[in-house]
């Protein structure tokens, strides 16, 4: 047994012991209080500010004020979603069917969390795990380890107030490594993986049940009925929030030809700097010069982006992000992929149908199953997208990065992990939420038989197909 194996096996054993005690002595009130304790560890304003600053300093991604907002709103929204929900014990008893349904914990959960959200994502997983009676072990990225370790100190401080075992929430010992994460994946009861697709694939091949989420590459369509100024302002807010660290920030905007020129006016008024062909080519070469996203542009403030690109002296006053007109889509046109930086690709479509085709092609390259934005006054268009496209969320007339993961003004669950269904190679198509952290147990009792006849089941079919009925 290697040193790493022994180390990881030891923390899994502690988590398993703690979880068994937590469940055997637990009840809904205890689980709810544990979830609130973990949430307050991050939401307490002084801690939130300290942790957000540490996260930006350690990862070099995003900005402090927006991380404070994200930590607060995402956690508050999650608490709203789980408030009053029965997540343990009997939830239903149906005399007619003879079925009683119970919820039980999964056991020990491992969550692999990204450097882009080293606080909001793990606390979301921790709150969901504790709400449902589980223990959880977090595996951060190397750059996210320090803020996560500090967060755990504050979680333990809150646990001490209500008598909870620290071993219910642990993290992979520093320094994180692929070897440690691999061993963790093999030894727990369920995996939750947010971040790189290589991590998701590793989770799916680990032999442990896994909830992986897909790659973001949000495409938003602007049709001829859209409120252009409103759309531009919402795209600006979404693109700029936390310097585009969100997988739900707009990466491509497709505008129907009849409103394209008017939209250019709106988007520049909203802070977009429209690039010409040479500037766009320079941006592409700079951001993808080695086959990877350039860390000098990745989730950096706009001043740093402009400086890196040499645009500081030519950028209009008030520039917040860059708008790069594009035509190419696919591997030979990397600008059509995910960027995680303060710019998006702008495409011009001859019609709404053409816009759909472009969006489908972009998602075939990257982001299939994740989400699609629409700015339109014609709700039938949203229905079209729901039935014609391969996206699990259609976000209508909203700032995409705020809306996709749940918002106080839409009905999606608050989450930082979006399942992309079979289109994105995921086992879930929903926003990851507490219902994914439970096992369902059903008691089945005998009831009077409910057995139909052949005529009951096939009468309409026989009539339509003009076949004689069978014998019961």
Image (tube, rainbow, N blue to C red):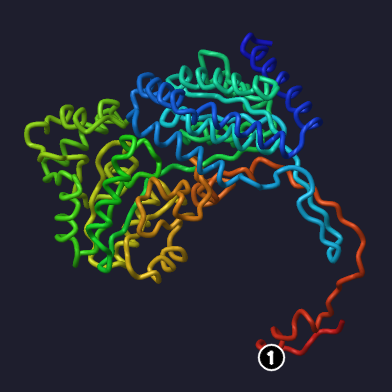
Is 146 placed left or right of 136 in the picture?
left
Label 1: few (<14), some (14–19) or many (≥20) C-alpha neighbours in 10 Å: few
Q: How far from the left and from the top, in percent, is residue 358? A: 31, 58
The answer to which image quadrant residue 123 occupies is top right
Query: Is residue 225 at least partly visible in the picture?
Result: yes
Residue 311's place in the image compared with 422, above or below, is above
Nearer to us in this view, 328 or 181: 181
Q: Residue at x 47, y 48 (%)?
A: 406
In this picture, residue 144 sits left or right of residue 225: right
The total of numbered circles placed on residues is 1
Name the residue beneath numbered marker 1: 466
x and y percent of residue 101 in the render? 79, 52
Q: Residue furthest left?
A: 313
Asked whether the viewer can see residue 391, the reply is: no
Does 120 sit above or below residue 375?
above
At horizontal 32% and vertical 47% (from top left) the residue drawn is 250
Residue 319: x and y in percent read 16, 40
Q: Residue at x 11, y 31 (%)?
A: 312
Q: Quadrant of residue 169?
A: top right
Image x and y of residue 301, in percent:
25, 31
From this viewpoint, which residue is outermost toward the top?
Answer: 3
**Quadrant of image for the C terminus:** bottom right
| SS for callout 1 | loop
Horizontal arrangement in the rendering, residue 279 relative to residue 337 (left or right)? left
The N terminus - image quarter = top right
């Amino acid at each position: 047994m290697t040193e790493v194996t022994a180390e990881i096996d030891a923390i899994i054993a502690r988590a398993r012991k703690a979880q068994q005690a937590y469940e055997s002595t637990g009840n809904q009130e205890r689980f709810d209080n544990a979830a609130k304790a973990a949430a307050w560890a991050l939401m307490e304003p002084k801690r939130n500010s300290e942790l957000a600053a540490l996260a930006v300093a350690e990862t070099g991604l995003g900005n402090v004020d927006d991380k404070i907002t994200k930590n607060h709103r995402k956690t508050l929204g999650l608490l709203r979603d789980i408030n009053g929900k029965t997540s343990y014990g009997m939830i239903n008893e149906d005399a007619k069917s003879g079925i009683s349904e119970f919820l039980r914990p999964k056991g020990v959960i491992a969550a692999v969390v990204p450097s882009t959200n080293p606080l909001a994502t793990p606390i979301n997983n921790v709150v969901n795990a504790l709400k449902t009676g589980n223990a959880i072990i977090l595996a951060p990225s190397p750059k996210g380890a320090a803020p996560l370790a500090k967060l755990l100190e504050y979680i333990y401080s809150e646990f001490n107030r209500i008598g909870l075992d620290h071993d219910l929430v642990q993290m992979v010992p520093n320094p994180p490594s692929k070897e440690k994460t691999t061993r963790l994946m093999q030894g727990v009861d369920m995996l939750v993986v947010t971040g790189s697709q290589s991590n998701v694939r590793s989770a799916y091949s680990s032999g442990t049940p896994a909830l992986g989420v897909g790659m973001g590459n949000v495409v938003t369509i602007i049709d001829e009925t859209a409120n252009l100024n409103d759309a531009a302002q919402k795209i600006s807010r979404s693109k700029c929030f936390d310097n585009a660290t969100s997988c739900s920030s707009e990466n491509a905007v497709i505008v129907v030809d009849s409103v394209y020129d008017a939209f250019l006016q709106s988007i520049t008024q909203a802070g977009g700097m429209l690039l010409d062909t040479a500037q766009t080519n320079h941006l592409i070469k700079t951001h993808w010069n080695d086959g990877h996203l350039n860390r000098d542009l990745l989730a950096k403030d706009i001043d740093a982006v402009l400086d890196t690109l040499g645009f500081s002296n030519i950028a209009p006053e008030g520039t917040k992000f860059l708008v790069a007109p594009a035509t190419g889509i696919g591997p030979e046109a990397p600008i059509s992929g995910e960027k995680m930086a303060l710019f998006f690709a702008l495409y011009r479509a001859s019609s709404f149908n053409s816009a759909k085709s472009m969006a489908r092609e972009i998602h075939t390259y990257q982001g299939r199953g994740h989400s699609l934005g629409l700015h339109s006054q014609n709700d039938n268009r949203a229905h079209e997208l729901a039935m014609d496209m391969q996206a699990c969320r259609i976000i209508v007339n909203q700032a995409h990065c705020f809306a996709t993961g749940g918002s106080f003004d839409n009905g999606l669950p608050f989450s930082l992990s979006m399942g992309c269904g079979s289109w994105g190679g995921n086992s879930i198509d929903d926003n990851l939420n507490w219902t994914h952290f439970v096992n369902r147990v059903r008691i089945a009792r005998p009831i009077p038989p409910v057995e139909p006849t052949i005529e009951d089941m096939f009468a309409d079919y026989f009539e339509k197909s003009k076949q004689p009925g069978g014998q019961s």
